[in-house]
Amino acid sequence: MPATEEQRTYYVTTPIYYVNDRPHLGHAYTTVAGDVLTRWHRQRGEKVHYLTGTDEHGQKILRTAEAHGVTPQEWCDRLVAEAWRPLWEHLRIANDDFIRTTEPRHTARAAEFVQGLYDRGEIYRGAYEGPYCVGCEEYKLPAELLPGATEEERLCPVHRRPVEWLAEENYFFRLSAYALRLLEHYAAHPEFIQPASARNEVLRFVEQGLQDLSISRSTFDWGVPLPWDDKHVLYVWVDALQNYLTAAGHGADPERFAELWPASVHLVGKDILRFHAVIWPAMLLAAGLPLPKRVVANGWLMVGGEKMSKSNLTGISPTDLTAHFGVDAYRYYFLRAIPYGTDGSFSWEDFTARYTSELANDFGNLASRLAAMVGRYFDGSLPAAVEPGPAEAAVAAALTGAVAEADRRIGEELDFAGGLGAVFDFVRVVNGYLSDQAPWQVAKDPSDAARGRLATILYTAAEGLRALAVLLNPVMPDTAAKLWESLGAAPLLGPLAGQTIATAADWGRLPAGATITKGEILFPRLEALEEKH
Ligand code: MSP
């Protein structure tokens, strides 16, 4: 029986990455976004499942392994163990599953799935020839290629490398038969493809009609053999897309599958949008399975006007940046600085500027000033507010607004930059409140009334920080935990992970008497940058 909406798990996926090389900033960008999205939904109190993994078959991996003199399986095992899993751990990615397309739980089900399509008459034998980019693992349309160095040479628009001419007798999926049904689905579910620019691109593409898709290869054997013809292996993209189903237990664990499928969000880069918004839903329609709820495309991290790739990364790796700025600032920076869905560039200067002004000065200093004042004026024990007035009500109202806005933008719209903007506007509200109320002045007056006022001001700022720890926990989990600790919140309110986004807005949750300690500086001063350029 299909699970009801309430029981359903919020199931988020990243693309599964090719392991021909180590992860770079572009890969980490999507994976961090997915992690923030899933942590946000967890913090709402929902059941969440976050899947990432690796795409290990196909010509690109085979050629890389050959060039290194090892078998493709050895190559994949090595890269996954030495590069991919360790980076996700380092970046605090809290994925629930990690699928590798060479695992039997995947290969067995992927073969069954295509056999099912074959049995339904959705697959036939035919011939195809055309330009192919091994970098994309995709046949290209002649019209989309760029001119090369010679008269005949043509370049892939993504990789800017020459395409190869392939002529093969293969098996084909009747993709062309699905154009109309796809268009109907896009019309009935306008939220299916996001952002709007991505949706329009897909609509224009499908409106022109679709060609059938070659789904097998017979010139090499690094892939899943077709069950009805083992001289062919499954085309790597048809193999890869199925990870979303096989990892969810399709064909193996009906209960798990009913809870997880259809996926809530497929996060993809804009270069692989057609695979996810055209080919994948068509295959699911052909198999009679429900379609994912949303496919959300992110832009590219650019360098010198081109998509960042292993060849033009200017030598910057994610760990170079985390060594300098720390993991939490790294997670924050890319999501805050680049509106999700658009291209963006990285620069040391921009990262440094945001680190210093937003994280260290606005947010980090607020936490350390509050702890210092509660220490100095109240021996580290948070006083109760005495007669809060309009200034305090304004802070509480700003919090309610910030929580609602951040929840809508991050949790629903995947507008991470806008949501974080709302949270940091609230940081500035609390800072503005402190400068206006000037507790350091109030503290000079020994009267009971002034003492009460001082208590109210410090309590208000501490409450603001309590809410900020909850709101920033999905983005900067280590920092939020340190803040939670320094507010003495755990013994009174329980673990940070148990707090929900909704209760972040409940003013007055942090009880008086909390032991506020100075703790570690949340965002220490950065080392000089000179040598990093
Ligand atoms: N293996 C396929 C995906 C199969 S999903 C069923 C693949 N792998 S990839 O490793 O080449 O790319 C994975 C993702 O990384 C894509 O979404 C791609 O857009 C993203 N990025 C690669 N370089 C990027 C940037 N410079 N910036 C942002 N994302 C980029 O494609």
Image: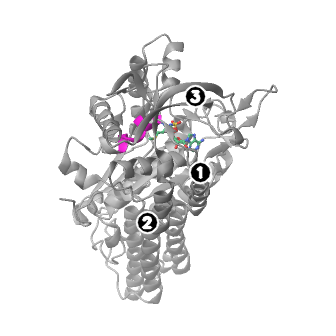
Q: Position of residue 473 (x, y in %)?
A: 39, 57
Q: Quadrant of the C terminus?
A: top right
Q: Position of residue 107 (x, y in %)?
A: 32, 31
Task: Inspect the image, locate mark 3, and give the three-letter code of the amino acid beneath it.
Answer: Val
The residue carrying mark 1 is 299
Q: Which residue is at 34% across, 66% downward?
A: 379
Q: Which residue is at 48% across, 29% downward?
A: 170
- Residues in magenta, as a range: 237-244
Counting residues from the N terminus, which is met first, the one under dot 3 or under dot 1?
3
Q: Which residue is at 56% across, 51% downward?
A: 334
Q: Is residue 144 magenta?
A: no
Task: Inspect the image, locate mark 1, and give the three-letter code of the amino acid beneath it.
Answer: Gly
Please indicate whether residue 393 sits to the left or right of residue 157 in the image.
Answer: left
The residue carrying mark 3 is 134
Counting residues from the N terminus, which is met first, the one under dot 1 or under dot 2?
1
Q: Secondary structure at mark 1?
A: loop
Please indicate whether residue 86 sits to the left or right of residue 306 in the image.
Answer: left
The residue carrying mark 2 is 412
The image shows residue 42, relative to residue 440, as above or below, that is above
